[in-house]
Image (tube, rainbow, N blue to C red):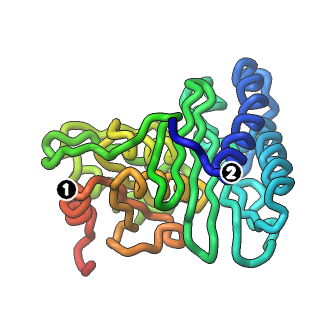
Amino acid sequence: MIKQSPLIVMMERAARRAARGLLRDFGEVENLQVSRKGPADFVSQADLKAEKVLREELEKARPEFGFLMEESGATKVGDGRHRWIVDPLDGTSNFLHGLPHFAISVAAERDGELIAGVVYEPLRDETYWAEKGIGAYLNQRRLRVSARRHLREALIATGVPFLGHGDAASHARYLVEFGKVMECVAGIRRWGTASLDLAFVAAGRFDGFWEHNLGPWDMAAGIVIVREAGGFVTDIAGGHNMLKSGGILAANDHLHAPLLQLLKQPGTA
């Protein structure tokens, strides 16, 4: 049985505590009070309550850490070296429509480097977690990315732009990308929860994942988990600017390069 570090234990404990409220509210999803955060982008009371619980738990355990949280933004600088990057409810649209596919995502960053990640899926009670140099796990089972070598065998996940996310040019770019990938792979899935898409890549359930216009909280934990499962993670240009650019491509070492080539736009290096 793998022994989790105190950091991972604390991150998972915070996620599980926040999940209690999400599970209660999901059971009464029709009664949730929902306010508009932007076009086609909703924030629920469940979101805000979960974020409050996570902040309280994480701040109590590591008061020196700063915060970057989806709903409240960069709310605390801390010691300037350590930071939590938190999404209290990834898959808000799924949640609000009663679709049972959402997660809590918590990442730890030190000196600008992601060092640990937890993605907790409350409905299945599945914890995907990883720490730099320790490996990636689903509960107590070691994770490895898939070993598929050919795109024609691969199942790829993505995120589709929607109203309020990206402009007309970015939507057009995505349609070009989708068409290119669709012609080369066994299937494409769009499940609406980036943290779980990345966790599924780490678990070998998906062979790759790409998306644009994500926030750091959508992918920070998943990046650590994929890397520790033996996968490759870059931005869409092949660099390592995912958290700032909002674009990400994750896959195993056989599929990352051909996927990157498919996603490159004319005129890019």
Q: Residues within 10 Å of mark 1 (few under 14, many from 20)?
A: some
Residue 60: mark in rendering: none
Q: Is residue 182 above or below residue 219?
A: above
Kindly identify which residue carries mark 1: 254
Q: Is residue 228 above or below residue 202?
A: below
SS at mark 1?
loop
The residue lying at 56 percent from left, 65 percent from top is: 114
Q: Give left or right: position of 149 versus 108.
A: left
Query: Quadrant location of the C terminus?
Result: bottom left
* Res 250 visible: yes
Q: Give left or right: position of 267 versus 30.
A: left
Say if mark 2 contacts mark 1, CB within 8 Å.
no
The residue lying at 27 percent from left, 70 percent from top is: 265
For marks 2 and 1, the one nearer the N-term is 2
The residue lying at 70 percent from left, 24 percent from top is: 26
Q: Which amino acid, mark 1?
A: His
Q: Which amino acid, mark 2?
A: Pro
Q: Residue 155 is drawn in which quadrant? A: top left
**Label 2, label 1: how far apart the Cα atoms are:** 34 Å
Kindly identify which residue carries mark 2: 6
